Structure formats: C-alpha cells, structure tokens
Image (spheres, helix red, strand yellow):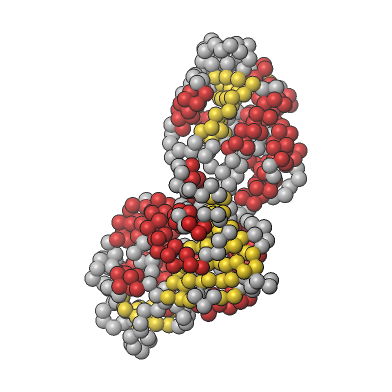
Amino acid sequence: MPRYLLFPGRHHLLTRFQAEYLHRLSTTGHRPTSDGDVDAPHGDPDAATGDGDVTEHDDEVTVVWAVTSANHENTRRNPVPYHRREAAIERFSVLAGLRSVVVPVFDTAATDRFAEVTLKNVAATAGLELTPANTVVACSTPQVAAMYAQLGFPIAGVEADVDPTPARPWDVLLRLAADDPSWRDLAHPATLDVYARYRLDDLVRSVVNDPVVGDEGGLTATRDYRTYAEAFADAAQRKWAAVREHVRPGRIVDVGCGAGAVLELADREPTLRESDLIGVEVARHLFEECVHKKAQGFFDNPNVFFYRRNVLGGAVFAPRSVDTTLTFALTHEIWSYGERMASLRRFVQAIYDHTVPGGVWINSDVCGPDGRDRTVRLRLSTTDGANPSRPRTDLASLPAEQVAEQLAGLSTRARLDQFAVDYRFPFPHRPVDDGTGALVELPLGAAMDFLTRKDYVDNWLSETQEEFCGLEWSDWKALLADVGFEVDPASGPYRNDWLVSHRLAPTAALSTVDGTPLDWPVTHVLLVARRPVNT
C-alpha cells in the first residue's frame, strides 16, 4: 500500500466516480477498471509499497490534493475560486471516508518540470516529502501523468483506467454550463452541496458562457497588462481632475477600474470620505493588483471594495443603488469586443438602471470624428523607416518582442499597410499615385483609428482588436437620450492637442479628396450623463 496518493488537478468539480475510485485505491491499493475489475497502479512494481516515510497514521493512506491554478478564479478555465474548491474537497473527503490534505499550487509559466514544481510546493506547504517509494500519482491527463512517470512515480489513471471512459470532471462542468441536468447525476454530493450553498452553478454558467472574456480572464490574450496598468496610472491624475467636479458623493463605482489608480485619488478627497468606493474589473491581472493594493494599505477609506465582474454578463448592482458611475477608456472596448452598438446599448442601459434618480454617469473615452465615413486623403511619412513591398501576415505567430521590433522599423506609411492586415475592422483604402507613394485615400474614421494607434508597437496585436472611432458625438447624444439620460452641458467631444503635436502632425497630414487641407478632428469625448430626478 502506498503512504500517499497524489491527486493533482484544478478540481473545480468532483464526481461520484472519483469518490469510488479513490476510496478503492486508498483502501485496497488497487484501482477499479471495467466491469468492476481491479488492477494495480502501473509503474515500478517495487514503488509505493509503504517502505518510505512513516507518519503517525501509519496504517492510513493520505490523499494529497494538489489544486493547480489556485490563484485563478472567475475565468473560463478556472471559474471556481480556490477556497470553494477546497471546501468541496474537504466535504468530499468526509463523505468518501478519505484522509486528505489540500495544497494550493499557484499558476506558473509553462514548463516541462511542472511535476517537480508541484512536489516542491507540497513539501513547502504541507511538509510532505512525496517520493516514488511512498506515493502513487492519480492523474488522468496523459501529458501530466508522463511527467510524474518520468520521475519514477507509479501512475493510477483514474478515468483513463476505465473502459468505457466515464465523464471527466471538466466534461461534467460543461454539462452544467450547457444546462444539461445530467450533470447532477455525475457530480458528487459534496460538489452539489457547495455549489448550491454558494450559487456556484450560476457562476459557472456565467463565466464559461461569457462571450467576451477569454479563457484566462482577459479581453485579449495579447495585451501586456503591465504596460497597460502603468499607462493608466500615469494618466489617472489628469482623468480625475477632468471629472472630479461632477462626482456625486455616496456610492461611487469605477467600472473597468484597471489597477485602481483613479479610486486611489478619490480616496484622498476629504469630501468623499463617507462614500463607498467600488472598483469593478474583468481582467484577472488588473483585479489581482487592486486586491493587492487594498491589502497593502493603499486606501484610507475602509469602505473600498473590488469585484471581478463582466458588466456585459448581467446586472452587477441593484437598481437605483449607485450615485456615481465612472468609466475611463472602457466603452470603446465594449463596442469592440462585444456586438458593437447592441452591446454598448445594453451596457448604457445597465448603467442607467443602477443609477439613483439624480445620479450621474461620467464617461471619458476616445471618440470618432464628425463625418467619420467620408473619404479623405492621408499623406504619411515614408522616410522614418523601412518600406517593404508588402506587409507581413504572420505577426500573430511571433513573440511580442519581435512584433514590436518589426513594427518599430517600419515607416509610418508602411505601418498603415500593416494596420490594414492586422486590424479586426476592415476598411477600404487605396494608394493615390502622385509619384511619392505617401498618399492614401480612406474613410476619415479609419484614418484616425490608425493614427491614434500607430505608435502602440508594444501592444499592437491587442490594440488592433479595438475600434476607437466607432461612434461620433452625435451617436453618443442619440444613444444617451434613447436610454433616458440627460446630457449635462459639460459634456462634449474634444481634441487631444498633445496627441496631435507629438504623434500625428510630425508624420501625417489630412486633406479632402481634392487636396484641401483639413484640420485635425476631435479624438476624445467627456460625457456627463444624469438620470432625471423624477424617474
């Protein structure tokens, strides 16, 4: 008999089959196979005989649950938080008659030494030295099992041991997400109990079926969140200064709060010291930074809270419960990653619904130019970099550093051709033969979408998934009025002149089709939208 059974996995859902299998393996040393047969774990016949370390429970096998991705939650791959997984495992162990130790294993970069990392984690966390002499590894994932087998551990294949193969836990979880009631017949009573008490079935359905958020909890897998958070923090003071006078004390919510930089500034306002400050962020990396800041004492106000939610997945706050909603550089992402106007309208409606009568929504974001669909000519520099004969079509397969290096070496004119390849929102464009190769004809909105992104070489593949100029000022006014908001006179579009003088004018010029020079259009919008008092 082995001293330990190591059972690595994410363990979001536990099954009745696992209970039977682990009970049999821990009490007899044999694994169930087909038709009720039993078999010994495969591997070294002399391994895991019990001749290794001896504990005070010398006659009892301990199941060591190495719960991987323990620091991930609310993502498609890892919907259930670790503490709920642990609770289900402990209850499962009591009901199945197992002696268990639960060990969290935080996510690491992909490595072929993952088995060694997990074993060291178990040793450091639980003080257990698991060796091939005292441990059988129970694992149904062939690639993971192979790592342990290479270290000499005997392997019990769990579901892989049985023919026909029973439903694996992840398959059962997907049945739950698909509203297939058969998941209840396969899930262990411990999972059913914990899921019911903490409404985890609703959470799983919401997260797994989320149309916007990716497997690892971000809008896009190519975004460098460190760079993103730093840029947002650098601009926080300017953003707060622009909106501060419009903030209504009370319950203040920053939707898409990033790493919480604006809420840090709100926390320092004496007039808001009695307010609740609430941050909502969908990206796992940024949400974790918010929680870390709160734990480190960045906020003086005790009523600072952070939630990891996708606002497109349904109402986050109760109706008429929020005094001020803040959104910065968010609405263009909802437009881009959702269903454009349909998603944006649902979002604006949700904001209206949770706003108290007399409350305010303050939105600062990029904005399309008036008449964004009209055709213009754009003259771009051809002397500030290379001008290859054609753009690359394989940037998505390259490492981020190589993508940035490739883009940085292109002229502004060549970057437009590359932008047309990588941009998720196709636009018509054609070169104008004036003998220079620098002139292009295209819609004004597409021209501004390119010009406001052309220097984002570090996050190019992420930024080209977003449309900055989907709505112009008249579209915003119509949308707000349709939902029921009143537009405060402080609202309006504006041009970021720093952007014009430092990024646009040095390498580009706009004109009409007949060559008449055009001034640079608006680039951003500030919306101060109030819910009428009598609604």
Is residue 173 left or right of 185 when viewed as pictured?
Answer: left
Q: Is residue 447 above or below residue 281?
A: below
Q: Quadrant of residue 168?
A: top right
Image quadrant in which the C terminus is located: bottom right
- Decide which of 299, 43 is in the foreground and name it: 299
Image quadrant in which the N terminus is located: top right
Q: Quadrant of residue 339?
A: bottom right
Location of residue 177 in the rendering, given as x and y in whole percent from the top left corner = 67, 48
- Decide which of 251, 386 is in the foreground and name it: 251
Location of residue 476 in the rendering, given as x and y in whole percent from the top left corner = 54, 75
- Decide which of 422, 128 is in the foreground and name it: 128
Q: Residue at x 45, y 38 (%)?
A: 108
Location of residue 386 in the rendering, given as x and y in whole percent from the top left corner = 26, 65
Q: In this view of the protein, can residue 130 be seen by the observer?
A: no
Q: Residue at x 50, y 26 (%)?
A: 125
Q: Quadrant of residue 345?
A: bottom right
Q: In this view of the protein, can residue 118 be seen by the observer?
A: yes
Q: Residue at x 46, y 44 (%)?
A: 297
Location of residue 422 in the rendering, given as x and y in whole percent from the top left corner = 42, 64
Q: Is residue 493 above or below residue 394?
A: below
Q: Residue furthest front?
A: 270
Q: Is residue 31 above or below residue 237?
A: above
Q: Residue at x 29, y 64 (%)?
A: 410
Q: Residue furthest left?
A: 383
